[in-house]
Image (cartoon, rainbow, N blue to C red):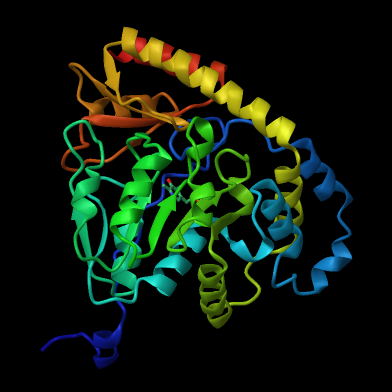
């Protein structure tokens, strides 16, 4: 006799996404979740210090007007072209729920952000993955097949490989009847955004986050920019799930971070500098890697097993990311930290290799 209760047959079973480890020990060097190694803009600290906590008894602004307006100004779009959510995971999840209701499969690369198939399974969206080529490049012609939507990160994760907006324009031209989502979590680290294309292609949704280039992973802020019809449809779904998603502090701090363009640019320049320096150091240690335009490197050692390097680094208190998965099991994804953190990583690697 089965010991499964009848109700269990009705459970929506899912295999959840596995986030990178957030170790309890604060003394580790954390290069495993692509966080920014620097604190957020000082204007964020000022808001938190001066915040009137009595305001917390009230529900937040459901429309996040302060944040939406600041983003609209920064990206030269109207406020009704901006959707905000609790991290870009929330925004992407809402976009999947809103737009991917077709019987045809949605398309995304075989090596990509490992949340896409989780949302597809959760929302019962059929999907088809399309293999990257041997250099981890997306083959855009493969996307010229009947589909229920397309989602691609640019730069791709965890490869870091970037394509120009013209590449996505070709995909958009071939797919006027599908929603195309470009997930630009890492675009600020050296790529050109597809946001300007949203004015030309009403089926394009560009998603970005405050977790990487704006140093605010802890506040959970993400956004999407697209035609106002797309934003309206997304808000209808969002308000059918939970109207009060963004807390007031995230709204205010997010707006302040966007307004501080000088800090943003200075911070990006430093991360890009350390990334290019790290490439040289890794090369000298016998690694090869993709030409990453993100805040991480996707690197493979010429002799030593990636899983072993991962474990030995962890023992030394240095966390990087490793997936024991076909095609990428020889690679480590290493977040760009401060120069000092990276030098500690290279010393540890010298000892291990
Ligand atoms: N997209 C990609 C490609 C990512 O790597 C991440 C980070 N895990 C996200 C979206 C989600 O980031 P967040 O929810 O912190 O905005």
Q: Is 189 in front, or is 308? A: 189
Q: Is 27 placed left or right of 71 in the picture?
A: left
Q: Is 245 in front, or is 293? A: 293
Q: Is 88 placed left or right of 325 in the picture?
A: right
The quadrant in which the C terminus is found is top left
Total tally of numbered discs in the picture: 0
Does the rendering let one see residue 215? yes
Q: Which residue is drawn at 16% across and 42% down?
A: 326
Q: Quadrant of residue 5?
A: bottom left
Name the spot of residue 155 as percent of width and height, x first.
Answer: 40, 39
Does the rendering let one see residue 351? no
Q: In this view, does 275 lie above or below 243?
A: above
Residue lying farthest to the left in this orientation: 1
Name the spot of residue 116 as percent of width and height, x first.
Answer: 34, 58
Q: In which quarter of the image is residue 338?
A: top right
Q: In this view, does 81 lie above or below 284?
A: below
Name the spot of residue 57 as percent of width and height, x first.
Answer: 81, 72
Q: Which residue is drawn at 60% across and 47% down?
A: 210
Q: Which residue is drawn at 38% across and 64% down?
A: 179
Name the spot of residue 344 as percent of width and height, x first.
Answer: 48, 16
């Amino acid at each position: 006799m089965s010991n499964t209760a009848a109700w269990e047959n009705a459970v929506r079973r899912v295999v959840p996404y596995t986030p990178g480890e957030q170790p309890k020990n604060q003394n580790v060097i954390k290069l495993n979740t692509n966080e920014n190694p620097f604190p957020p803009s000082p204007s964020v600290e000022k808001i938190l210090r001066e915040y009137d906590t009595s305001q917390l008894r009230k529900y937040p602004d459901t429309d996040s007007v302060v944040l939406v307006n600041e983003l609209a100004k920064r990206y030269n779009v109207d406020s009704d072209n901006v959707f905000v959510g609790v991290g870009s995971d929330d925004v992407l999840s809402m976009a999947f729920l809103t737009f991917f209701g077709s019987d045809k499969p949605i398309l995304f690369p075989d090596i990509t952000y490992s949340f896409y198939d989780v949302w597809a399974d959760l929302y019962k969206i059929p999907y088809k993955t399309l293999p990257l080529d041997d250099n981890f490049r997306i083959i855009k012609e493969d996307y010229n097949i009947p589909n229920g939507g397309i989602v691609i990160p640019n730069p791709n994760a965890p490869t870091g490989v970037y394509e120009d907006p013209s590449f996505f324009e070709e995909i958009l031209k071939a797919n006027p009847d599908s929603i195309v989502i470009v997930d630009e979590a890492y675009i600020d680290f050296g790529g050109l955004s597809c946001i300007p294309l949203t004015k030309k292609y009403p089926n394009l949704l560009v998603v970005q986050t405050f977790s990487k280039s704006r140093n605010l992973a802890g506040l959970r802020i993400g956004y999407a920019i697209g035609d106002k019809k797309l934003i309206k449809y997304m808000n209808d779904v969002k308000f059918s799930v939970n109207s009060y998603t963004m807390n007031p502090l995230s709204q205010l701090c997010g707006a302040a971070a966007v307004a501080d363009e000088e800090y943003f640019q200075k911070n990006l320049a430093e991360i890009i500098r350390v990334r290019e320096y790290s490439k040289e150091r890794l090369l000298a240690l016998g690694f090869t890697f993709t030409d990453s335009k993100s805040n991480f490197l996707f690197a493979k050692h010429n002799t030593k097993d990636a899983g072993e390097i991962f474990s030995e680094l962890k023992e030394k208190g240095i966390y990087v990311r490793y997936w024991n998965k076909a095609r990428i099991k020889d690679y480590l994804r290493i977040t760009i930290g401060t120069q000092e953190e990276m030098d500690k990583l290279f010393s540890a690697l010298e000892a291990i290799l």
